[in-house]
Image (tube, coloured by chain):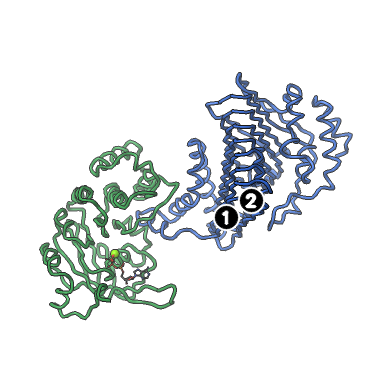
Amino acid sequence: MATLEVKNLHVEIEDEERKTKKEILKGVNLEMKTGEIHAIMGPNGTGKSTLSQTIMGQSNYHVTEGDILLNGESILEMPVDERARKGLFLAMQYPAEIQGVTNAEFLRAAINARRPENDKISVMDFLKELDKNLELLDMSQKMTERYLNEGFSGGEKKRNEILQLLMIKPNFALLDEIDSGLDIDALKVVSKGVNSMRGDNFGALIITHYQRLLNYIQPDVVHVMMGGRIVKNGPADLALKLEKEGYAGLRDELGLDVKLVDED
Amino acid sequence: MTPDKLVQIATENNEPEWFVQKRRMALDVMDELPLPEIQRFDFHNWQMTPDVSQKIRTSLQPNQNFVLTDIFDAINEYPELLQKYYMQKVIKPDENKFTAYHTAFMNQGIFLYVPKNTVIEDPIEINLEQNSQAPFISHILIVAEENTQFSFIQKMTTTGDQSAIANCIVEIVAQANSNIKYAAVDELGENVTSYLSRRAYVGQNAYVDWSIGMMNSGNTIADFDTDLYGEGSHSEIKVVDITSGRQQQGINTRVTNYGKHSIGHINQRGVIMDRSRLIFNGIGHIINGASGSNAEQQNRVLMMSSKAHGDANPILLIDENDVIAGHAASVGQVDQKQLYYLMSRGIDKKTAQRLVIRGFLGDVLVSIPSKQIREQLIQTIERKLENGQQVSENSK
Ligand SMILES: Nc1ncnc2c1ncn2[C@@H]1O[C@H](COP(=O)(O)OP(=O)(O)OP(=O)(O)O)[C@@H](O)[C@H]1O
Ligand SMILES: [Mg+2]
């Protein structure tokens, strides 16, 4: 069993134009184990992507207080690639595009990055695994010969993030709005992909705005984030309640002093 | 070298009188001629004109449908064609000191003649191996008659590691409605100082596609020229260049639109590592009368080190009103967002950097028509980048 703990995490970001610093995460606490699926919901601009990017190690986000522990070990000093090799994976809200590097070549490089020099994956094994996952995600072989995310539609990019997840098999996946922009069939396919990973060696943190995704991927815990903190934890049906009552309702119920984006 | 000695060597090599005289005249004017002009790049103290006496013969597979032969055989077997085209129609001996030197001392070469209405399915592949013990003055003359279509792939490598010079000229005559793809992967060695001049004369509705992988490890100056003479003539010029160590490279890539409705696009990408220097001059010249023509260029360089020097310098000279012309140039750093994305999948920083660089070169690489050349070039790029990363590591 692996664990991921976020302890009293404070994160700042520097506004490059105005040269000012802004605190975005204001003391986030979260504990996850493999075998569990967690969901995070929360209004726009509240810091959900910031949390996932900070866990992954994106260098624009500066941790000013608190810690992130993977299996009890602090990862704050580790570069991004090392965190990934230790078992973290982030499906990004906006994946990068790289022309000239094929999807297949990239996937192989990512798999081999986790293996010792003298034990790289064979072409046969790689293709076998790839075919299996392509089939599961209802993707065509052609997608893997195309350049990484280049010219992919929004939905294709999301599917491609999940393909990477299935190929890389991390311990913890952070899935940032993996459902946004997906049609209903694609939503089912993507959920099927994530569900196929479920098991003792896999945990996920799913960031979403829509309860609908959670019908397909049943979470064990739902966290609500507002104003840079997790303000409420609950079982799966917390998402249903939120969908009905909105964030303003919850805020007032908790007596929080948080401004929501659409109130600006 | 004295003119008498030059004449003697040429005559011993069985060269006809007109050819010997051409050498001799070039030798006569060589010293008075200026160096080629490469803006923002100083190479006046490069030693590029040693005496040459040795000739290098090239053996090639004969073919029924076209002529592909050693240039010294060609001078005797196809004298009219050679007299008409060799350093005559496309590049002239007296353009600068190095073209004159080339004419005087040319010691290796290939002649390709493709007769009218010939389509060659398989690419013609030429591997030039320069031996670092002698100067390499190499000439490729390609004459494509009307309605021809073919691809020509040229690779160039060095054996040995002595200091040497290379002066390589490629002339392409693309007659009306011909369609030619020329791909070059240049991998001259670290101690080879080279001058590369490649130029095409493009006739009516003819098309010339250049894909050039400048992977030399030594100092290089290059002139890549396309003269769009014919109405509706068209050329796409793609150059990918990587410099590392203390290498110096100055590249002129020029298109001149003479013909109405002619189209010339330049797309150059350079990666500059360590303490190397790379200057890209993209020159678009539209001659008065070339109405409806189109000249566009992109020159981009990526700086991988703060000690590197790079410049992307677009030069547009437009003497006609009714045209479309444009340019884009940039000098930048590795795309951090791409680097992060790759690293977030566990790929180590150096490998990720190489992939991001590939992404930067991507839009030039993907437009290289032959998959085979593309893959070879990618391998070469990978190797060169790895070596470059190693060099930077060691010099830290
Ligand atoms: N790189 C950045 N530069 C400047 N501001 C940033 C940056 N990243 C995040 N922010 C700011 O931090 C706040 C939180 O952003 P974040 O992307 O984490 O929100 P989110 O909860 O993921 O929102 P959404 O639901 O819209 O995706 C926002 O006000 C945002 O503008
Ligand atoms: Mg977000």
Circle 2 Cα neighbour tier, 10 Å, few/some/many (<14 / 14–19 / ≥20): many
Name which quarter of the figure residue A49 lies in: bottom left
Contact between marks 2 and 1 (CB within 8 A): the answer is: yes
Is ligand 1 closer than 8 angstroms to the Cβ of mark 1?
no
Q: Amino acid at mark 2?
A: Gly
Query: In the rendered view, would you say B166 is above or below B347?
Result: above
User: Visible in this render: residue B343?
Assistant: yes
A4 and B287: which is toward the camera? B287
Name which quarter of the figure residue B136 lies in: top right
The spot of residue A177 in percent (x, y) is: 26, 59
The residue pinned by badge 2 equals: B284
Q: Which dot marks residue B344?
A: none
User: Visible in this render: residue A174?
Assistant: no
* Tag 2 subunit: B
* Tag 1 subunit: B
Is the N terminus of chain B in the top left, top right, bottom left or bottom right quadrant? top right
Rendering quadrant holding ligand 1: bottom left
Q: Amino acid at mark 1?
A: His
Q: Secondary structure at mark 1?
A: strand
The spot of residue A147 in percent (x, y) is: 40, 46
- Tint applied to chain A in the drawing: green
Left or right: B296, with B349 as reference point: right
Q: Secondary structure at mark 2?
A: strand
Query: What's the CA distance linking mark 2 and mark 1?
Result: 9 Å
- Tint applied to chain B in the drawing: blue
Left or right: B138, with B370 as reference point: right
Q: Earlier in the sequence, mark 2 or mark 1?
A: 2
Is the C terminus of chain B in the top left, top right, bottom left or bottom right quadrant? bottom right
Query: In the rendered view, would you say B147 is above or below B46?
Result: above
At x 24% / y 77%, what residue is drawn? A259
Query: In the rendered view, would you say A202 is above or below B237?
Result: below
Left or right: B218, with A247 as reference point: right
